[in-house]
Amino acid sequence: MSDKIKVTIDGIPVEVAPGTTILNAARQIGGDIVPPAMCYYSKLEGSGGKCRTCLVKVSKGSEKDPRPMPKLIASCRTTVMDGMEVQNITSPEVLEARKGVVEMLLINHPLDCPVCDQAGECHLQDLAFDHGSQATRYEFDRRTFDKIDIGDKIQLHMTRCILCYRCVFVADQITNTRLHGILNRGDHSEISTYISKAVDNDFSGNVIDVCPVGALTDKTFRFKNRVWFTKPVEAHCECDKCSGKVTLWYKGDEVLRVTGRKDTYGEVADFICNTCRFDKKATSDWVIEGPTKVARTSVINSNHYDTLQPLPVIKKNLVLMAANKVEFEKAVKH
């Protein structure tokens, strides 16, 4: 007897292990039917259930109890049942709800994409493009926060934060001490510390990689370039603190920044230490493996090459060159 559970998502059947969430079942199928996720992170225990962007409709609970669930549910926190049928992009109700969730996330989010370092790899940008409204109905002032300094390597923009809790989970689970968290309640909630410049440990830089928006950015990369003008390259080194597997972001021969390697869903495969992230900005520090695979839908793909050396922009046209030579000789004779 098979230990797998059969679930159908948008009419596509898939067999998964017991305990698998609807979101991860959809990821096994892949493609457009995978619900978006702003707070869920498969590498972080306890993540998910905060942003509500992954809402789906369960039209059939299971074979034993075929009744549909009365409300839309968060796919990242709901495990599948045998015979369950789920609707994501095939449900107008889900798409309308997701549109409302995006509108709520953008209520206080500043429209500073042109100056935000996260632009081009921001999940909220993608979500707003796919499900956002053309205009806002919000007429009140956006919330503001007092600026605080949390260290010399990480820049905090609290006005951009959507309270996904990812950075808190990272500090809890991969560092020895957590010195930041969520302070206050309601619309006054914010990521902060009780002590200025407190976020400083060997793995604190990973909060930059897990942040889905531009709330936590790299100070060493701040305002240096746009990601679509850079070229990501896979590299590794011998490191006694982490795996040493990174992505180097080049502009010409210069390494502008170093990040952890991310998968299709923007999740870091192996967290890296601050030494690899901030202190090794020379090509000689790394063993180059090759160009990073970039999705064709990403703006980064516009400056991406399959070879380490950029392909020539202008190709030689021998016929045209010969014709130009003839015309040049005529002009010289006269």
Image: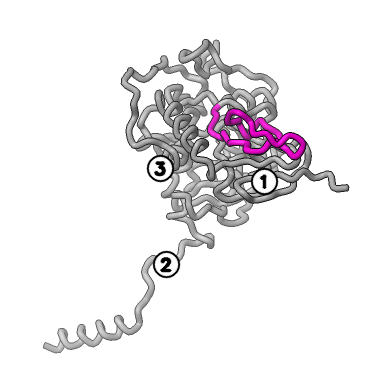
Q: Work out whether mark 3 precedes mark 2 in sequence or the reverse, and give the earlier one.
A: 3
| Residue hosting label 3 | 225
Give yes or no for contact between labels 2 and 1 (Cβ–Cβ under 8 Å). no
Q: Which residue shows up at 47% across the image and 38% down it?
A: 127
| Residue hosting label 1 | 8
Give yes or no for contact between labels 3 and 2 (Cβ–Cβ under 8 Å). no
Kind of residue indicated by mark 2: Pro
Residue 193 at x, y percent in the picture: 54, 15
Q: Is residue 101 above or below residue 266?
A: above
Give yes or no for contact between labels 1 and 3 (Cβ–Cβ under 8 Å). no
Farthest residue toward the left? 334
What is the crowding at mark 1: few (fewer than 14 residues within 10 Å), some, or many (at least 20)?
A: many
296 part of magenta stretch: no
What is the crowding at mark 2: few (fewer than 14 residues within 10 Å), some, or many (at least 20)?
A: few
Q: How many marks?
A: 3
Q: Which residue shows up at 45% across the image and 65% down it?
A: 311
Q: Is residue 204 above or below residue 309?
A: above
Kindly report the distance in space between the C-alpha atoms of the residues bearing marks 1 and 3: 44 Å
The answer to whether 65 appears left or right of 187 in the picture is right
Residue 218 seen in the figure: no
Q: Work out whether mark 2 precedes mark 1 in sequence or the reverse, and give the earlier one.
A: 1
Depth order, front residue of 329/258:
258
Residue 31 at x, y percent in the picture: 58, 50
Residue 133 at x, y percent in the picture: 38, 35
Which label is found at residue 312?
2
Q: Work out whether mark 1 precedes mark 3 in sequence or the reverse, and give the earlier one.
A: 1
* Quarter of the picture holding the C terminus: bottom left
The answer to whether 136 appears left or right of 228 in the picture is left
Q: Quadrant of residue 206?
A: top right
Magenta residues, as a range? Answer: 51-80
